Image (cartoon, helix red, strand yellow):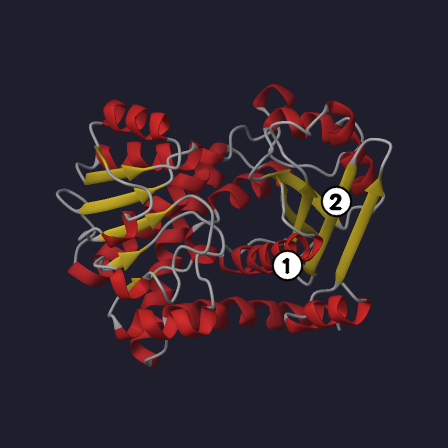
Amino acid sequence: MQNSTIFNLMATADHQNLFFCNDPAVGLKAIVAIHDTTLGPAIGGVRMLPYESEEEAIEDALRLSKAITYKSSLAGLNLGGGCAVIIGNNRTDKTEVLMRRVGKFIEGLNGNFIASIDVGTTQKDLEHIHAETNYVAGLPTSMNGGGDTTVFAARGVFYGIKAAIKELYGDDSLAGRKIAVQGVGSVGEHLVSMLRNENARVYVSDMTEERKLKVAAKYKAEPIQYATSYELDVDVYAPCALGGTVNPDTVPKMRCKIIAGSANNQLKDEEETIKLLKEHNILYAPDFLINSGALISCYSELEGYGTERTESLIRNIYTATRHVLQRSREENITTYEAAKQLAEKRIEDMSKLKR
């Protein structure tokens, strides 16, 4: 990729920084993207995937860091948006020395980026990173951290679903509502548990057949095919795996009323997809609006907040979602545009304090 192309990609969404680390001695190729630090230091997950190209890794880091900026803004947090990606297979290439080298890379950014976990990394990996830098969040409770962030992520999505149900049906009861959860990893499983506790009728799918059947049996949910889970006639389609499942090819086949899940970057070809969602009368709860529970947990850890304050911030996702949906309805704009406007307005307002 030519330098001019990289700068053009960064300019598209006004990214501030893009840092690279190449260390052949430990097999590390890593990228840290920082989108915006108006609200505070950038925070983001460390994602490890076998990207097909360096270009794909860069684009993923840029997209994710921008989403974190919006998440933080809408949640009322004093943090900016960032992301770290490692090019490699997290099952076969990951070692202690590799993750500690990531920690040294992050330490060299002098606090401009705070690392947490993401797809392909765990709390144990974060401990290795923490051995080389204090700029981490999401550590185990045994290390005075906030603990497992996935339960908080699921809770935020749960409140987002309830807010969307309220908008569509007039009350937020989930009893008898049909909800398809695509992807039942840690976040997806927690979400299934919460939904079943409110007597929702839940359908589950996962790329791993064994995982799907196990979760379905555990929570008395109904297993369905992963590849066509978005086609089910349900109240809510909740994508909780990787992004991009809501796109120009899938939307015409959808029979859900609401899309609300934890996957990052759910929309592919955003402009066209948003238009199609409106044409098909599907209510979309933007992922950067309702999937901020893990980020809130990390923020609480950094600020030293207790459980009560963390719960209060996560419950506010319900109110924030109701506000976005109301703005969308009253101004006849998409929910995506309404959420984006509110996020950017807070950033613009806070930037005045720095002038």
Residue 329 vs residue 284, the one in the foreground = 284
Is residue 81 visible in the rendered image? The answer is no
The secondary structure type at the circle numbered 1 is helix
Based on the displayed image, in which of its 4 quarters is residue 28 positioned?
A: top right
At a point 62% along the width and 32% down the height, the residue shown is 90
Residue at left 79%, top 34%?
Answer: 27
Kindly identify which residue carries mark 2. Answer: 30
Q: Residue at x 54, y 72 (%)?
A: 345
Work out how far the residue at label 2 is from the one at label 1, CA to CA, in angstroms.
13 Å
- Give the percent coordinates (x, y) of residue 182: 34, 43
**Which residue matches tag 1?**
59
Mark 1: few, some, or many residues within 10 Å (few <14, many ≥20)? some
Q: Are marks 2 and 1 in contact (CB under 8 Å)?
A: no
Image quadrant occupied by the C terminus: bottom right
Amino acid carrying mark 1 in the image:
Glu
Q: Is residue 78 above or below residue 219?
A: below
* Outermost residue toward the bottom in this view: 331
Left or right: 302 with respect to 343? right
Going from the N terminus, do you reach mark 2 or mark 1 first? 2
Mark 2 element type: strand
Local crowd size for mark 2, using a 10 Å CA cut-off: few (<14), some (14–19), many (≥20): many
User: Which residue extends farthest top?
Assistant: 142
Q: Position of residue 313 (x, y in %)?
A: 46, 46
Relative placement, left or right, of 109 versus 276 is right
